[in-house]
Amino acid sequence: MDAHSLDPVENNITVMETKANGSMDTKSSVENGQLPDPAHWAVADVVNYFKATGFEEQANAFQDQEIDGKSLLLMTRNDVLTGLSIKLGPALKIYEYHVKPLQTQHLKSNAS
């Protein structure tokens, strides 16, 4: 299986918890089988998430564009494909397998 299509929660690739400085710790445990709400992620947390899911090279684009969790949740497919200046193949995978599911998770967890 391609590392880029792995679900970080199901495969324990990355796990985050809020630290005192407001960033997340990628070595802690996931509660209820889900990542913490991305709306609370700092830019470094977004970068670490993508590095942990196999997008080491592309993760820097999120740093360069100062994409924090709230910005990540607002991104459209077009933003990911054209706004980050990354190759089309990885950009498509990032959007379909990571950005879109994180947005869906956020909406479901905040709907109640």
Image: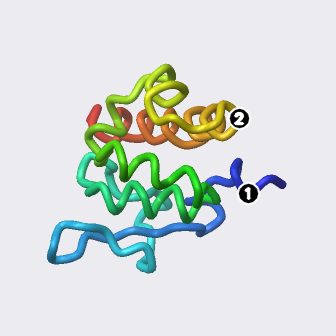
Residue 37 on image: x %, y %: 32, 51
Which circle, 1 or 2, is nearer the viewer?
A: 2
Q: Residues within 10 Å of mark 2 (few under 14, many from 20)?
A: few
Type of the residue with mark 1: Ala
Identify whether 110 is placed above or below 59: above
The C terminus lies in quadrant = top left
Residue drawn at the location 64% of the way across and 36% of the way down: 87
- Residue where numbered disc 1 is placed: 3
31 left or right of 97 in image:
left
- Residue where numbered disc 2 is placed: 89
The image quadrant of residue 94 is top right
The N terminus lies in quadrant = bottom right
Labels 1 & 2 near each other (Cβ < 8 A): no
Residue drawn at the location 46% of the way across and 57% of the way down: 34
Residue drawn at the location 54% of the way across and 62% of the way down: 51
Give whichever of 63, 3 is nearer the camera. 63
Identify whether 59 is placed above or below 102: below
Residue 3 on image: x %, y %: 73, 57
The image quadrant of residue 95 is top right
Q: Residues within 10 Å of mark 1 (few under 14, many from 20)?
A: few
Residue 29 on image: x %, y %: 44, 75
> Mark 1 or 2 closer to N-term?
1
Type of the residue with mark 2: Gly
